[in-house]
Each structure stands twice: as C-alpha cells, then as structure tokens.
C-alpha cells in the first residue's frame, strides 16, 4: 500500500508539472504581437508622435452623423506631454502634462478634469496598442482560437483592468500565424463594439493603425451596423 501511495503521489506531481504555464502563454503571445508591430525597443525610443485622426460617425441607417478631424501631438522625452486639437463650432483642445489634463474651448481654458484626462488617455491607449498591454495592472487571459469577420482565425486575449474605476471587458484578436493585432471588441455597459484594423502605417519602425472600422455588434459578435471609420495620417 505504501509503495502504491508513493507511486500515486509521483504520478499526480508529474501530471500537474506537465500542465502548461498559462502566464507564459499570454506573455508569449503579447511578445510575438509586439514583435510583429516593430518591437519594444523601437517603441521606447520613439520621442515624438504627430498624426491627424479623421473620424466619421454613422447612424444606424448608414447616414453620416458627423465628421471630425483631430491633430495629435505627443512628446515622450522626460515624461509624457501631449495635445489633441479639433474644431466644431469652436476651436477645441485637450492638453496633457504631469498626469493631469484640461480642455480649452475657444480662448477659454478650463480647470483640470477627469473628462479631459479620459479623452487623452483613451486616444493614447488606442494608438499605442499592443505595447500598452505591458502596462502594470493589466490582467490578460488567453481564451484560445476563435473566428471573426471574414472567417479570420485569431488568437483571443481577454484583457481586464481590475484596478480601474470603470470596468470594461476587452478582447484583443491576434492573427493566428503572424500575430499582428487585427481587431478588438469592447463591452461598454449594455453595448458591444468590434473595431477592426483594416490597414497599417509604418512610422518610426513601428506598425501603427492606418485605417479602422468600428461596428456595433451584439453579445455574440454579430454585426448590427457600422458605427465609425477612423483614418490615421502620420507626419
């Protein structure tokens, strides 16, 4: 009996020790994705980023709701600073520095606000994917292979931010063989958006988004309608 018990313990140890390290799976995929987009060294050495972001929003019937053209300037030398500027009825600007942000409407400068900070952080986060997956507090779970638009087979990474005040569930889709980031899905409250990366632009040795399409989808990922199109033009 004693010998059988020892053999049983040894067998259990072997089984559990042979299980794949889940953390290594997520890290491996993130690293392959970052490599596919130009690597971490090129990203860390990028000091200035300047681009125009053209946004077209659509209503459910396909008609244009509005179009916006923004200019984005980021400087990442001794700490990140940046501005986002656009015009509707007024000239508008978001300025970020030292972890805070404020808005300017026409000639009127507002106080630092969470709304301004959220606007800046969202734009900077979207631009700098997949490198931002390395941020502290990011919890990543590999969900396996899946199929998205046009029967594209992808690796699925579920990304959560447990320490964030606002809870949103993200899924990022990596090309099965080339590992570049080709789409993501986000759950905002009661709605779901699927955003596809339709083309890329190489800037500073890095592969950034060139054109993207945002679809309103249901919980199963079925497309309801096109909500927005984005174009990034780098200087």
Image (tube, helix red, strand yellow):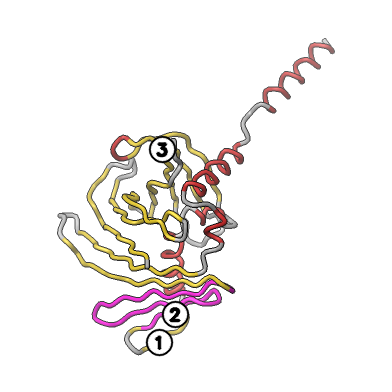
- Element marked by disc 3: strand
- Confirm or deny contact between disc 1 and disc 2 (CB under 8 A): yes
Task: Determine which residue is flagged by label 3.
Answer: 154
Residue 1 against residue 33 in the figure, above or below: above
Total numbered badges shown on the rendered structure: 3
- Confirm or deny contact between disc 1 and disc 3 (CB under 8 A): no
Q: Is residue 178 visible?
A: yes
Marks 1/2: CA–CA distance: 7 Å
Residue 231 against residue 116 in the figure, above or below: above
Marker disc for residue 31: none
Corner quadrant of residue 123: bottom left
Tell me the quarter of the image containing the C terminus. Answer: bottom left
Task: Determine which residue is flagged by label 1.
Answer: 109
- Element marked by disc 2: strand
- Element marked by disc 1: strand
Span shown in magenta: 78-104
Marker disc for residue 102: 2
- What x and y, as percent, mark residue 8? 75, 16
- What x and y, as percent, mark residue 196? 33, 49
Rate crowding at label 1 as few (under 14), some (14 to 19) or many (20 or more) other CA atoms within 10 Å: few
Q: Disc 2 or disc 3, which is closer to the eye?
A: 3
Q: Earlier in the sequence, mark 1 or mark 3?
A: 1
- What x and y, as percent, mark residue 2? 84, 13
Residue 122 against residue 191 in the figure, above or below: below
- What x and y, as percent, mark residue 70? 32, 71
Nearest the viewer among 64 and 182 is 182
Q: Is residue 192 visible?
A: no
Marks 2/3: CA–CA distance: 39 Å
């Amino acid at each position: 009996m004693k010998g059988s018990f020892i053999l049983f313990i040894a067998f259990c140890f072997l089984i559990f020790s042979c299980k794949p390290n889940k953390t290594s799976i997520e890290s491996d995929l993130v690293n392959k994705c970052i490599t596919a987009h130009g690597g971490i060294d090129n990203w860390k050495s990028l000091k200035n980023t300047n681009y125009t972001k053209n946004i077209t929003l659509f209503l459910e019937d396909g008609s244009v709701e509005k179009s916006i053209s923004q200019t984005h300037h980021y400087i990442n030398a001794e700490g990140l600073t940046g501005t986002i500027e656009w015009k509707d009825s007024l000239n508008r600007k978001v300025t970020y520095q030292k972890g805070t942000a404020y808005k300017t409407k026409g000639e009127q400068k507002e106080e630092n606000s969470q709304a301004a900070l959220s606007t800046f952080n969202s734009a900077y986060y979207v631009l700098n994917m997949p490198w931002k997956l390395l941020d502290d507090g990011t919890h990543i779970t590999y969900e396996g292979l899946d199929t998205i638009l046009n029967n594209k087979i992808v690796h699925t990474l579920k990304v959560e931010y447990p320490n964030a005040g606002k809870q949103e569930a993200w899924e990022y889709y990596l090309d099965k063989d080339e590992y570049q980031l080709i789409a993501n899905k986000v759950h905002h409250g009661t709605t779901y958006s699927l955003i596809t990366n339709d083309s890329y632009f190489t800037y500073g040795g890095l592969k950034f988004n060139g054109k993207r399409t945002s679809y309103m989808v249901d919980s199963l990922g079925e497309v309801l309608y096109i909500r927005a199109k984005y174009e990034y033009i780098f200087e």
